Image (tube, grey):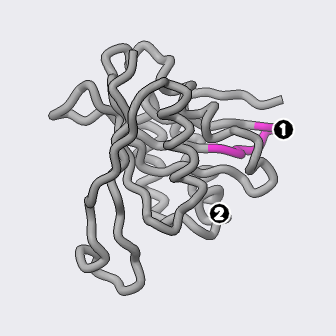
Amino acid sequence: METFREPTLDDGAGVWTLIKETGVLDLNSSYSYLMWCSVFSDTSVVVEADGQIVGFISGFIKPASPDKLFIWQVAVDGEQRGKGLASKMLHHILERDICENVRYVEATVSPSNTPSRKLFNGLARSLDTNIEVSDCFTAEDFPEEGHEDELMHLIGPFK
């Protein structure tokens, strides 16, 4: 059985490991995941199954736009993919009191990231709203070679 909850500081190392094991997400420092799990826990989620972290979403409400929830990373354990876990995690966050004024979800997605594009298109459908895609970061904006463009996906308004 899966348990959805706010992450805690104790989850930081497990989240870092989950991100690393996906093999497709940008792996940030372990410090950054400790910060996400403690400072941004109210707008992030972990999913546990059999005592293991099998899902994680990091997000925050934009200070300059308190009606926008920005989703930074979405990770699902390989054995759990294809079961709708990412969608359930997004809805879990949006149902929290802290998101009562959120009317939009934003996320950047690279063109080749089909699972994330499907996730956010599905979120727009489930919320009966629009999705707009626009340029955000170009490959040239990144200091290392090989990073794709990142397109901004804006879902909303909803509620």
Specify the amino acid type for callout 2. Thr
Which residue is nearer to you in this view: 128 or 137? 128
Residue 130 coordinates in the image, percent (x, y): 39, 34
Q: Which residue is mark 1?
A: 50
Residue 121 coordinates in the image, percent (x, y): 51, 42
Give the residue at x 27% y 25%. Answer: 67
Query: In what quadrant of the picture does the N terminus appear?
Result: top right
Residue at mark 1 to residue at mark 2: CA–CA distance: 19 Å
Give the residue at x 50% y 18%. Answer: 95
Q: Which residue extends farthest left?
A: 64
Query: Where 45 falls versus 22 (above or below)?
Result: above
Query: Left or right of 125: which side holds 139?
Result: left
Q: Secondary structure at mark 2?
A: helix
The total number of labels drawn is: 2
| The quarter of the displayed image where residue 142 is located | bottom left
Which residue is nearer to you in this view: 26 or 68? 68
Check disc 1: other Cα within 10 Å, few if <14, some if 14-19, many if 20+: few
Check disc 2: other Cα within 10 Å, few if <14, some if 14-19, many if 20+: some
Residue interval drawn in magenta: 49-55
Query: Left or right of 153: which side holds 124?
Result: right
Disc 1 vs disc 2: which is toward the camera? 2
Query: Where 92 falls versus 30 (above or below)?
Result: above
Residue 41 coordinates in the image, percent (x, y): 46, 33
Query: Where 90 falls versus 97 (above or below)?
Result: below
Q: Which residue extends farthest bottom?
A: 145
Q: Is residue 64 magenta?
A: no
Which residue is nearer to you in this view: 137 or 63? 137
Query: In what quadrant of the picture does the C terminus appear?
Result: top left
Residue 61 coordinates in the image, percent (x, y): 31, 32
Magenta highlight: main SS: strand
Q: Which residue is mark 2?
A: 22
